[in-house]
Image: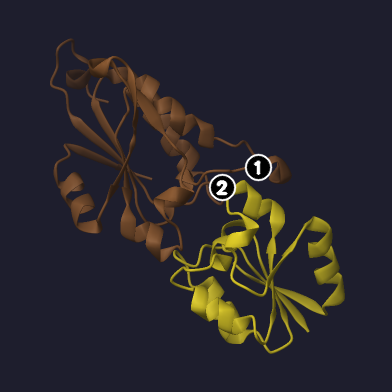
Chain colours: A brown, B yellow
Amino acid sequence: MSDEMMDEGGKVKKFLYLNRKAPYGTIYALESLEVVLIAAAFDQDVSLAFVDDGVYQLCKGQDTAGVDMKNFSPTYNALGDYDITKLYVEKESLEERGLSVDDLMDIVYEDEDDDWAEKPSIRLVSRTEMAEVMEQQDVILSF
Amino acid sequence: MILHTVNKSPFERTALESCLDHAQPGSAVLMLEDGVYGAVAGSRVADKVAQAAKDCKLYVLGPDLAARGISQDKLVAGVGVVDYGGFVDLAAENSSVQAWL
């Protein structure tokens, strides 16, 4: 993290955390979430992207009781409290895996500019749109 | 017969594909950990899995399925769900275990 970024009134950059791994088979998904929460303290413009096996991270109904691992999926719903309200999910990645947006958690945030109305954080985008989202970033972090 | 196990996502590695191409008719294939994603109906690999289910006995490990939020009614027809005890039974019933890592 550069000094410039942490300066008071420094330029706000667009950060994209690009997630491409399923949640429990490797540590990537959990590590990504940890870094996102740390980075949230720096008041940057943060978006999350879920591509390829990364879409599995957002599946609802995760129950890890039988595998003796921490179920970290509820944490995604807390991201709104850290002003992380843009979760881009690639439609084609879902479809290739036999999934639809209905299989994902209902992740919401409270919009302070709209009387704290609850709004969906998940933005379903096409592969072409995802490429555009990536193009618009200053920094992309891969997990 | 051999018990084949697959623990990788079929969308990231070719383990499931290689496994199904080598599993002889009558053998057992157990999908576990990220391998359970291979058992979901309607996916890019579902047709190949459904085809394999005609000749082989296909299973997924229930606790790994539940951890990932995949409900049992989303599975390819013909795929059975086993618990850890069932995994042990499969290992005991077969002469050897081939893990497609």
Q: Residue at x 60, y 65 (%)?
A: B75
Quarter of the image for residue B87 reads: bottom right
Residue annotated with mark 2: A24
Label 2, label 1: how far apart the Cα atoms are: 9 Å
Q: Image check: B52 left or right of A137?
A: right
- Residue A101, placed above or below residue B97: above
Q: Image check: A22 left or right of A121?
A: right
Quarter of the image for residue B36 reads: bottom right
Q: Residue at x 40, y 50 (%)?
A: A101
Marks 1 and 2: in contact by CB < 8 Å?
A: yes
Q: Secondary structure at mark 1?
A: loop
Residue annotated with mark 1: A64
Q: Residue at x 43, y 71 (%)?
A: B44
Q: On what subunit does the disc labeled 2 rest?
A: A
Q: Amino acid at mark 1?
A: Thr
Closer to the camera in the image, B14 or B44? B44
**Crowd class of label 2 (few under 14; some 14 to 19; many from 20; radius 10 Å):** many
Q: Position of residue B18 (x, y in %)?
A: 54, 79
- Residue B96, placed above or below residue A124: below
Q: Amino acid at mark 2?
A: Tyr
Q: Position of residue B47 (x, y in %)?
A: 50, 79
Closer to the camera in the image, A12 or A73? A73
- Residue A140, placed above or below residue A20: above
- Quadrant, the N terminus of chain A: top left
Q: Position of residue B89 (x, y in %)?
A: 85, 67
Closer to the camera in the image, A23 or A4? A23
Q: On what subunit does the disc labeled 1 rest?
A: A
